[in-house]
Amino acid sequence: MAEVSKIWRIIDLLKITEGLLKEKGISSPRLNAELLLSDTLNTNRMDLYLNFEKPLQESELTEFRGKIKRRLSREPLQYVTGKCGFYGMEFKVGPSVLIPRPETETLIDVSLENIRARELDNPKILEIGTGSGCISIAIAGKINCRIDSIDTSNDALKIAEENSGTNNTSSKINFQLKDIFRDVMDFSGYDIVISNPPYIAFNELETLEPEVRDFEPLAALTDNEDGLKFYRRIFELATKTDGKTSVLLEIGDGKRANVENLAINMGITNYCFYKDLLNIDRVIYAEIW
Ligand SMILES: C[S@@+](CC[C@H](N)C(=O)[O-])C[C@H]1O[C@@H](n2cnc3c(N)ncnc32)[C@H](O)[C@@H]1O
């Protein structure tokens, strides 16, 4: 007798996938199941519920199973789907770039506010550690500007360039392979230097979720030291610059005191902090000269 293959409807798959993800301790299992399935079916979450009796084709099932398997191994959802939303735009992501975080949107808001308040017309911006390009691209999507965006990862720069193309900002951003510790860096000529640097201290790596620790690029997460190495270098380069340099840097949760002490010890007195939507000190703005 011919074997009758089971029919899997959207509603069945959501339920079973939610259970599997929950068992593995993955947070927001239902949302993950919905996003993986809508990505497989090239639809949105709402459509899943409008068509919840619909059975999947064999090829769709195979693709979906592959995605669940990856997610069950704790690979981040955004790497499995290959995309991430940030500041109302869509970005391609993969294992060579940090997944853009919602809290980094504070850095964009503060940067745009700063540019407006200083009445900078077509400002020249340097972004250190661009990764997926999300910061530069979000800013360039909003204003006239010229941005030099650097990173040490060639693979990240390729993704950033692609993201800049799909978000129509290519004419405003110049991506460059550069290392702020090894290459000659000169901040003069830039109205603002922006960065979300790798700020996790080496000894904090073990406290991270497996999705982050085991999948995101180590060079994007940690400085392999005390979490302050990039701030030290950026402040040092800024103090060496002729004229005034304005820097806007993201900081980690609970790191305000460390960054503030460092700034004071380096003779920087004109600075302030901005909070994110969760009321966490998230960005330092310093004017250095
Ligand atoms: C925390 S990630 C930020 C990525 C992106 N800007 C974002 O906010 O999602 C830091 C980035 O700095 C880059 N990086 C690490 N060391 C660097 C260095 N010495 N010079 C320049 N960039 C560096 C990493 O490759 C990574 O892309």
Image (tube, grey):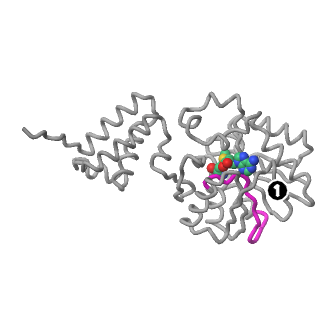
Give how far across and how far down residue 140 sits, in percent: 65, 65
Q: Position of residue 107 (x, y in %)?
A: 68, 52
Which residue is identified by label 1?
246
Q: Residue at x 48, y 51 (%)?
A: 82
Residue extent of the magenta highlight = 117-132
In reply to whether residue 135 is colored magenta, the answer given is no
On screen, residue 1 above or below 242: above
Where the C terminus falls, by quadrant?
A: bottom right
Which amino acid type corresponds to the residue marked 1 in the rendered image?
Ser
Location of residue 3 by image quarter: top left
Crowding around mark 1 (Cα neighbors within 10 Å: few <14, some 14 to 19, many 20+) is many
- Image quadrant containing the N terminus: top left
- Residue lying at the far left in this picture: please name it: 1
- The reply to whether the magenta stretch includes residue 118 is yes
Q: Is residue 28 above or below residue 60?
A: above
Identify which residue, 58 or 90, lies in the foreground: 58
Residue lying at 76% horizontally and 34% vertically, measured from the top left: 225
155, 166: nearer the viewer: 155
